[in-house]
Image (tube, rainbow, N blue to C red):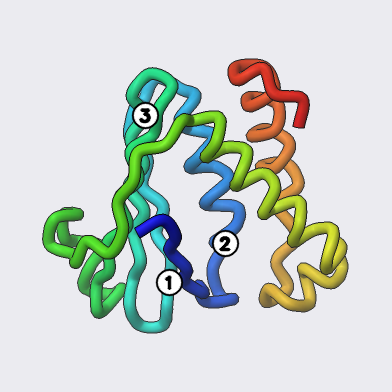
Amino acid sequence: MSEHEDTPSYCTHALADLLTGVAGLYGADAARRVSFDMEPPEVRWVLRAGGKTVGIDIYWFPDLHESFRLPDGDGELRWSSVQPRRVVAHAVLEAAQGVLDKHGAKGYRKQWGDEPFPAAELGELRRLHEERDNCAH
């Protein structure tokens, strides 16, 4: 499988959480988890940095209210891949920038339950990606 697609609830900070999770791959903590509320399922991304690569496992749980207490392995593995960190960061940056370009900050807020666009999180991931992956994104 080369692609995976889900649509998280507008009641969450999904984009900000994803940007923060990917930015965390540049730090000392080698694993990050990003949880998406699918009303009621949970989709959990487990991101593991290994040098300049990232292991990505996406798990599905039937009920978000129960799954927060469960280990990753109790979920159903829906997608798994290992990619260069620069590719993962670049893809997330392009997707987030595409959302901003399409909707604008006001449109994003209207579309996403009155939450502001995560500009600071986007900026931080962009900075890390440019500095550590030598990408002029």
Spatial CA distance of label 1 from label 2 is: 9 Å
Residue 104 relative to residue 93: left or right: right
Which SS class for mark 2?
A: loop
**Residue receiving disc 2:** 13
**Which residue is drawn at the image coordinates 48% and 42% (left, top)?**
21
Residue 4: x percent and y percent?
43, 63
Q: Is residue 71 above or below residue 76?
A: above
Residue type at mark 1: give it: Asp
Distance, label 2 to label 3, CA atoms, is 23 Å
Ranked by sequence position, the earlier of labels 2 and 3 is: 2
Q: Secondary structure at mark 1?
A: strand
Residue on which disc 1 sits:
37
Q: Position of 74 compared to 37: left or right? A: left
Residue drawn at the location 46% of the way across and 71% of the way down = 6
Of pointers 1 and 2, the one earlier in the residue sequence: 2
The residue depicted at 34 percent of the width and 70 percent of the height is 42
Q: Do the residues bearing badges 3 and 1 touch, measured as CB atoms within 8 Å?
A: no
Does the residue at mark 2 contact the one at mark 3 (Cβ under 8 Å)? no
User: In the image, which disc is placed on residue 24?
Assistant: none
State the residue at coordinates (55%, 36%). 87
Q: Identify residue type, mark 3.
A: Ala
Which of the 4 quarters of the picture holds residue 86?
Answer: top right
Horizontally, is 13 left or right of 24 in the view? right
Q: Residue 44 versus residue 89: which sits nearer the camera?
A: 89
**58 is higher (above) or lower (below) than 114:** above
Q: Which residue is mark 3?
A: 49
Residue type highlighted by circle 2: His
